[in-house]
Image (cartoon, rainbow, N blue to C red):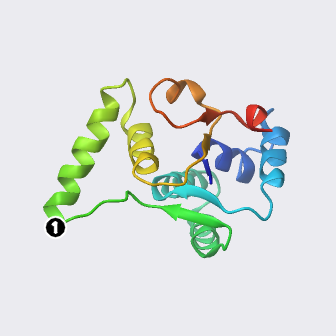
């Protein structure tokens, strides 16, 4: 399954004058009919960007569109927890181990979520330098994927 970063989602939905828009659009077209993945963190980040760019109503619409889509799988960290405290311990250790690889928190949390899920064939992002050489996942830009 192909996982998609927030930057592609933001360009596709909001920043249509971005020079990367056409390539981003072609990337999404190439995946028509295929199940794609985004983390819950990517979805929340997109909704925050939409909310500041166009308003809360649009953010709510986007959230519902993605959460009810049949060809988008929303990924959560895949954990076995005994109690609520285990979640926080897992979040801190999972993210911090990625922060130690030279990542910011948001990227570390997204990578933690992706790495705790199976079936991720590649992670597509324009921000390849944020992830390159920091994971065993295949990290590609949209042109590299296409």
* Above or below 65: residue 133: above
**Is the residue marked by circle 1 packed among few (<14), some (14-19), or many (20+) residues within 10 Å?**
few
Q: Quadrant of the C terminus?
A: top right
- Figure label count: 1
Hey, which quadrant is residue 139 in on the image? top right
Q: Quadrant of the N terminus?
A: bottom right
Q: Quadrant of residue 127?
A: top right
In the displayed structure, 126 sits above or below 14; it is above
Q: Residue at x 60, y 55 (%)?
A: 50
Circle 1 is placed at which residue position? 82
1, 68: nearer the viewer: 1
Residue 14 placement (x, y as % from top left): 71, 50
Which residue is at 44% across, 38% downward? 107
Residue at 42% across, 60% down: 76
The residue at 39%/32% (across/down) is: 104
Between 7 and 133, which is closer to the camera in this rendering?
A: 133
Q: Where residue 62 sits in the image (x, y, percent)?
A: 63, 66
Looking at the image, residue 67 sits to the left or right of residue 114; the answer is right
Residue 2 against residue 69 in the figure, above or below: above
Secondary structure type for disc 1: loop
Q: Is residue 29 left or right of residue 87?
A: right
Can you give x and y, in whole percent of width and height, for residue 123 in the image? Answer: 59, 42
Residue 125 is left or right of residue 77, and the answer is: right
* As drawn, 67 above or below 129: below
């Amino acid at each position: 399954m192909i996982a998609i970063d927030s930057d592609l989602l933001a360009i596709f939905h909001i920043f249509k004058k971005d020079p990367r828009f056409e390539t981003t659009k072609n990337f999404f077209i190439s995946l028509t009919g295929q199940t794609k993945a985004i983390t819950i963190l990517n979805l929340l980040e997109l909704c925050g960007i939409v909310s500041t760019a166009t308003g809360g109503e649009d953010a709510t619409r986007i959230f519902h569109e993605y959460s009810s889509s049949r060809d988008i799988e929303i990924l959560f960290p895949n954990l076995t927890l005994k109690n609520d405290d285990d979640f926080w311990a897992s979040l801190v250790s999972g993210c911090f181990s990625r922060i130690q690889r030279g990542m910011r928190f948001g990227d570390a949390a997204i990578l933690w979520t992706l790495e705790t899920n199976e079936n991720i064939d590649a992670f597509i992002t324009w921000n390849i330098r944020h992830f390159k050489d920091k994971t065993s996942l295949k990290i590609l830009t949209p042109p590299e994927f296409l």
